[in-house]
Amino acid sequence: MAKKKSSNADGLLRMYEQMVRIRTFEDNANQLYLSAKMPGLTHMYSGQEAVAVGICEALEKTDHITSTHRGHGHCVAKGAKFKEMFCELLGKAEGYCRGKGGSMHIADQENGNLGANAIVGGSAGIATGAALTAKRLGTGAVSVCFFGDGALGQGLLYEVMNMAALWRLPMIYACENNLYGEYTHVSEMAAGEIGGRARAFGIEAFKVDGQDVLAVNRLTQDLVQRARKGEGPFFVELATYRYHGHHVGDINRTYYRSKEEEADWKKNRDPITNFGDWLIAEKIASAADLDALNEGIRANAKAAVDYALNAPYPPSSEVDAHVYAA
Amino acid sequence: MAKKKSSNADGLLRMYEQMVRIRTFEDNANQLYLSAKMPGLTHMYSGQEAVAVGICEALEKTDHITSTHRGHGHCVAKGAKFKEMFCELLGKAEGYCRGKGGSMHIADQENGNLGANAIVGGSAGIATGAALTAKRLGTGAVSVCFFGDGALGQGLLYEVMNMAALWRLPMIYACENNLYGEYTHVSEMAAGEIGGRARAFGIEAFKVDGQDVLAVNRLTQDLVQRARKGEGPFFVELATYRYHGHHVGDINRTYYRSKEEEADWKKNRDPITNFGDWLIAEKIASAADLDALNEGIRANAKAAVDYALNAPYPPSSEVDAHVYAA
Amino acid sequence: MREITLSQAVNEAIAEEMRSDPTIVLLGEDVAEAGTPFKILSGLVEEFGPDRIVDTPISEPGFAGIAVGAAMTGMRPIVDLMFGDFLFLVMDQICNQAAKTHYMSGGKLNVPMVLRTNLGATRRSAAQHSQSLHALVAHIPGLKVALPSSAYEAKGLLKTAIRDNNPVVIFEDKLMYQDKAPVPEEEYTIAFGEANVLRQGNDITLVAISSMVQVALAAADLLAADGISAEVIDPRTIVPLDDKTIVQSVKKTSRAMVIDEGHQSYGVTAEIAARISEQAFYHLDAPVGRLGAMDVPVPFSPALEDLTVPTAEVVAQRARLAVRGELFRVA
Amino acid sequence: MREITLSQAVNEAIAEEMRSDPTIVLLGEDVAEAGTPFKILSGLVEEFGPDRIVDTPISEPGFAGIAVGAAMTGMRPIVDLMFGDFLFLVMDQICNQAAKTHYMSGGKLNVPMVLRTNLGATRRSAAQHSQSLHALVAHIPGLKVALPSSAYEAKGLLKTAIRDNNPVVIFEDKLMYQDKAPVPEEEYTIAFGEANVLRQGNDITLVAISSMVQVALAAADLLAADGISAEVIDPRTIVPLDDKTIVQSVKKTSRAMVIDEGHQSYGVTAEIAARISEQAFYHLDAPVGRLGAMDVPVPFSPALEDLTVPTAEVVAQRARLAVRGELFRVA
Ligand SMILES: Cc1ncc(C[n+]2csc(CCOP(=O)(O)OP(=O)(O)O)c2C)c(N)n1
Ligand SMILES: Cc1ncc(C[n+]2csc(CCOP(=O)(O)OP(=O)(O)O)c2C)c(N)n1
Ligand SMILES: [Mg+2]
Ligand SMILES: [Mg+2]
């Protein structure tokens, strides 16, 4: 059964810490990319931290998640370490996937992260399959599928929600509605009301402020508990926002969203600032505590980046290893 | 604009006639199969006649439909002739598709039937594309996608309903809920409430008695008119029943549906009997009129079958014709 | 030895494996009470219950994806895909997800799943229910591809597939479901990547896949009547492909022909012919012949459909030309 | 002659055709204001409006299917599939529906649509954004498959594709979008099924597809330095395939090698090599060489990814062995 690990001060601070870890990770990843030290393309999770953290802090290590192309946040939130993550982003042998997956496929199966996915919506089946395993083998685990508003366009999602509902799987569909899929507003891509798409299958659907880590966490704790009792599946729409462009190269964004809108979210709805202020107001932590915590995380990240930059690539002999499992 | 062609006595009789034509066609097809004169496998539409006829009688020849593996009824209802249909079922050169399509791919593009489809749900995109054409080229045509309750399992349907809703296409999704997909009851295959699956996309959804040709026709006339005005898309669930097995070889059905259930539908809810009784009660036709009409159709069908049985197969040179259009 | 049908062989393989491994679950349309439209799985739900023999909605992409996730987390799902033609619906889940997961995770995640489906025309089922699409999945690294040519092969290969730690696609010939063959009562498996030499010969090597093994054997009989001795080889799996056995045979016979029911162009015959040409070039007395299905959608009309697939007569006729040194298809 | 990028060439082809044919409509993700993530279509929505340059939701199967239906009823849709890897999502609509409709209807229904997509690795985009999947669609009768190797080719082939009355899949090399080439201002098209001999030579024929044409030309330069004269042929379309031009060349050079960026096994190199071996067997002095991408999912790590695709050096090295009569890959 899920411990309500985030209802005490330790848990609250841990949520703050995890959000800062994600933000810090992304700031470093962004720098690596901008300084041409990181190959390929990547998608920043900054702004959406309360979603990944609020949900993952309600999960056990043995619960499963699947993630998306915008997957660093989920990975950190589910327990991954900076060093192996940066190594992966740089294609190094010590990365979580030995450098073979990269940003869009980072996985951390030890902590129950079945992987980012470069096919939008592509992991909806995988997450639901993990829930099937949990139910059939009676492990008590719950499975969370993270996906964006854009993934609502993929028919696969409706197919698996139907089966999850028919079979009462311990499944939570977490739709991170950050208002855009690439350069298009959700209103141009999704007709109707989002929650209705789950309710159509008899699935209980919720909507929550995805910038409020406490609200996200409380709801998720409740749903996880209910899912473990066989009352799932559930669907949650999380209203959130991505601060950066769709990917790191998406610089000129004014043709699809205004600078004012961006500024408003960053200034008034930042999940970390707001939660930090609350922690201070509630006297759970002092401003100095939080500063120290931020400082420590920045140092950790820097150390991990430095390590990763100097770490070796996989040997060329690995190119045809892991095509087939023994 | 749609003429309300079925609101007068001629129109009513024509609906009766078209239903009898379908039933008679299927009785003959079934016999051909049982006597091993028909190759392959086929799915009988008997019992569902009011759906195809009620809808197609509200359409113009220039409106498009897409059909299913259980497609003979839609084909007849949209205006096809017996001779070319039987020739197609027997793989003869004079068939609508020169014998190349057969029962599961019969099409009649002259009358706007874009074809049966052997992929469940596979024509949802095609029908929606026809509606896109109508809207872009301003033809005023409406497009109807016929599909079974089983096709609700296919994600493609949700993808195209979303686009039809976003783009306000002149589209009617006609879900023939005959309670079974193959040997499984709809309740084991579809969670939630069927109409909700369209409403989730902001599509107006209706439910109608699919055994009542007048009710089906009235609703469709209304929706066709509204669709032509740009108020579409729409979704209609038609409650109906197939009298035969899933395909002609499905004889022992008691493990998935009871003999009583079958008998009840045939005895109390037959669309032809009930509509015939109503025509007589309303003095629109006499019993003798209807008998004569039935007799004539039977004779027509027999003549077409005889013709088709003796008609030539396509020459072997046609085997690699029509792979590519000129 | 007792004889059972290919359908029974498949049923036995699944039942035996399910008895010894509780992580096996079977997913598909009408697999439970109905036992599939082909009645291949009859009896399984009675023994293993609806939690392990799971009827799904008509959602091929969905349940294929669910199988991938179940496989990644400790189960061994078997997916029943009613017709091989529906492969097109599950390609993303099988080729982008299942096939690549082990590699993309640097070897950390496994996807031990089996996709059971079928191939074969001449059932008058027309273009969307008659395709032989094994070449498509054979092109995608990370998938293994098995093609049993008899009841014996079907049982042995399926058991191996179920125990394999990778996604395996197995194609049964739907026209052979009722064909009987001797199958031992005792447990056995058939290793992947080991071709089966069904008939020894010296004049030409006939490499035949799945449904075409019987055609090749019949052609070998016809050729024998002409005094031509054909060696017949069934690769059993095309990924991995035992080209060693094939090439060895061709070095002996100096001639080869590859027969397959998939479309000829960009299909399986091309790869096997190319490997033979590469590895036995200096031993070949004639170009390697290829005979696949015609490059046309499968027509419904019986008058046309039968023209599209290789027959023993055509195989024999082409083989005769090759053996007699009369060039074919040479401009 | 003016030089423009491949991306501009594609843009021009579409704009020109749309100007003269009002039934052309373009569907895809972020094709309108954004002009695609590659910025290929910038400006089109301004000229043709959002009714003809249509932004879709992220629903590849859905909008591919809509295109099929629109094509059947009088439009000429162009579908923009952002990455070739997403082909797996649209296989049913393209291969079961679009490819077969004309045939299944006995020639009565046409599906004049274009699926524009791309191929090519070494962009560090990892396994699900780097595949070259043209072999898959080439195997399905009813589809045509074009692969431009320069800006010039891209414009001419795309215009032909748009005017064709069949479903055409066209693969652009995503690494070449910014590469410039001379492209005339005047209208022109490039016929399907006519290979392009880019360089004349006598010692070996290099048949190269798409991205590999540049590799083959670079290899030919390396070989020239060794006194080996290579003929380089770009088939332009693999369906229809102009095997006549290829075979003629091989009859002259007596040696051939086929180079492609798709996976080697069960891929395009096999078909072309097999056709050469069949039709020029008695002219060949060495086995037809094949060089495709490695049979591995495309790895992210730059240290590994570059190893998976053919390079000019490897092509030249293998070609040298063939010309010098030193067998390769022969057991
Ligand atoms: C099947 C598929 N189609 C298109 C893409 C290209 N693509 C990558 S991310 C993206 C937008 C996704 O939007 P959303 O799901 O809202 O996630 P977000 O980027 O907002 O986190 C698109 C279209 C893809 N990766 N996969
Ligand atoms: C994609 C796909 N999956 C499975 C099948 C096999 N199949 C043919 S008909 C059918 C049942 C369809 O049920 P429904 O849509 O309710 O139509 P009905 O047969 O009741 O008219 C199935 C599963 C198929 N033809 N296509
Ligand atoms: Mg989004
Ligand atoms: Mg039904």
Image (tube, coloured by chain):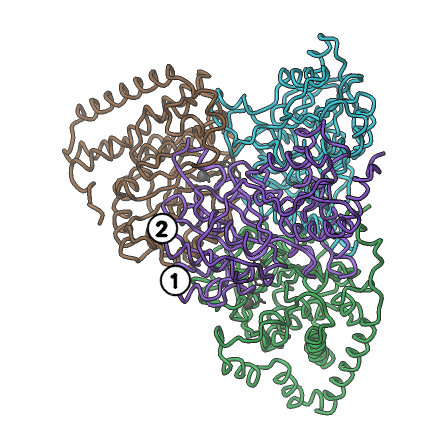
Chain colours: A green, B brown, C cyan, D purple
Q: Is residue D291 above or below residue C123?
A: below
What residue is pinned by disc 2? B133
State the SS at label 2. helix
* Residue A240 visible to an observer of this rendering: yes
Q: Position of residue B6 (x, y in %)?
A: 20, 40
| Residues at marks 2 and 1, CA–CA distance in whole angstroms | 16 Å
What crowding class fits label 2: few (fewer than 14 Cα within 10 Å), some (14-19), or many (20 or more)? Answer: many
Q: Position of residue A106 (x, y in %)?
A: 72, 62
Q: Quadrant of residue C2?
A: top right
Foreground: B280 or A13?
A13
What residue is pinned by disc 1? D48
Query: Mark 2: which amino acid?
Result: Thr
Single out the residue that lies furthest toward the front: D227
Q: Report the quarter where the N terminus of chain A lies.
A: bottom right
Q: Quadrant of residue A170?
A: bottom right
Q: Is residue D193 above or below residue A172?
A: above
Foreground mark, 2 or 1, reads 1
What crowding class fits label 1: few (fewer than 14 Cα within 10 Å), some (14-19), or many (20 or more)? Answer: some
Foreground: D229 or B106?
D229
Residue at (70%, 19%) from the top-left corner? C322
Foreground: D245 or A130?
D245
Foreground: C122 or D323?
D323
Q: Position of residue C138 (x, y in %)?
A: 69, 39
